[in-house]
Amino acid sequence: MENRSSVIDFMLAAFPMTLTMRTFFFSLLTSIHIITLSGNILIILIVWKSHSLHTPMYYFLVNLSILDICFTSTIIPKFLNILASENRSVLFQSCLTQCYFYFLLGSVELLLLAVMSFDRYTAVCHPLHYTAVMTPDFCLCLILGCWLAGFADTIIPTLLITKLYFCGPNVIDHFFCDAEQLLKLACSDTRTIRIVNLFCSFLVVFGSLSFILISYGYIISAIIKASKVGERWKPFSTCVSHLLIVVIIYGSSLFLCMRGITLAAIDISKLSALMTGIVTPLLSPFIYTLKNNQVKASIKHLVIMRSLGV
């Protein structure tokens, strides 16, 4: 869409650093990015190669890994470029594109976590009906639904941002093109878009979180009703990995959602974005593999088969 703003590019302030600090964080961030990509690709390959993992839970896990790869790749490359060359400039169109995909992928991930909680609820509370409910077609519909809902949630605020007028200054006090920072730089009225943005954020964040809390409320109730200790631990152990990711992601997402009305410090906002965009995609593969005996067994099996040349 045509935008008549006098600003043709933005400057990302990122973090103030000395040359030594930039060199250190460039090496650290590069290592984190490589580990993140490798870990999530490994999960995708393990599920693809292991027929025992061709179940709904692991289909969702593969989609979560794909989201993490795309999510972290949306912000890290430009951040690395800033650290390496001090090239903080980003074109107007590129900035809007990065902003859109960051929040699109984030919204889809939150919705997918809600879908995964439903999967765990069905497995724990209705085990006899699990295969009948979580069919491949139904799982595909759930995944597509997450993408469509994420698209609908983020496209309207993004289109409204394209209509804003930017006349300067053009410095974004963040390490990526954050929507809140773009609104602060706009020379036109942003009240409508702030209300729409806040509504869409609350709809996805609190809607998906409420669904997760309700699902785990039923799961905990079913676990408490179990007669034996072993029967209580087994269903709960399958939910531990998912709960850890939920706590990490929603802890950061709730802050990012609330900052529009709390006016929190920008440095805390940057740290929160680092958690959701860099740290969580890094930890996710390790949490799901180290806490999941079935995945670890599949890795061992694949390693043995590979060593035998099968």
Image (cartoon, helix red, strand yellow):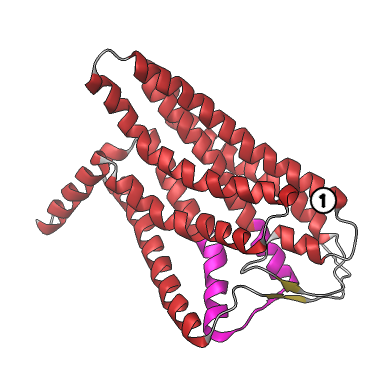
Quarter of image, res 148: top right
Q: Residue furthest left?
A: 308
Q: Secondary structure at mark 1?
A: helix
The relative height of residue 181 versus residue 216 in the rendered view (above or below) is below
Quarter of image, res 17: bottom right
Q: Considering depth in this image, is 296 or 192 the residue closer to the camera?
A: 192
Residue that carries the numbered disc 1 in the rendered image: 193
Q: Main secondary structure of the magenta part?
A: helix
- Residue shown at 36% from the left, 17% from the top: 224
Quarter of image, res 167: bottom right
- Residue shown at 46% from the left, 35% from the top: 116
Q: Considering depth in this image, is 304 or 197 the residue closer to the camera?
A: 197
Q: Is residue 118 left or right of residue 57?
A: right
Screen quadrant of the N terminus: bottom right
Q: Is residue 282 left or right of residue 306?
A: right
Q: Is residue 211 visible?
A: yes
- Residue shown at 43% from the left, 25% from the top: 121
Q: Which residues are magenta?
A: 71-100
Question: At which x and y percent is residue 120?
Answer: 41, 29
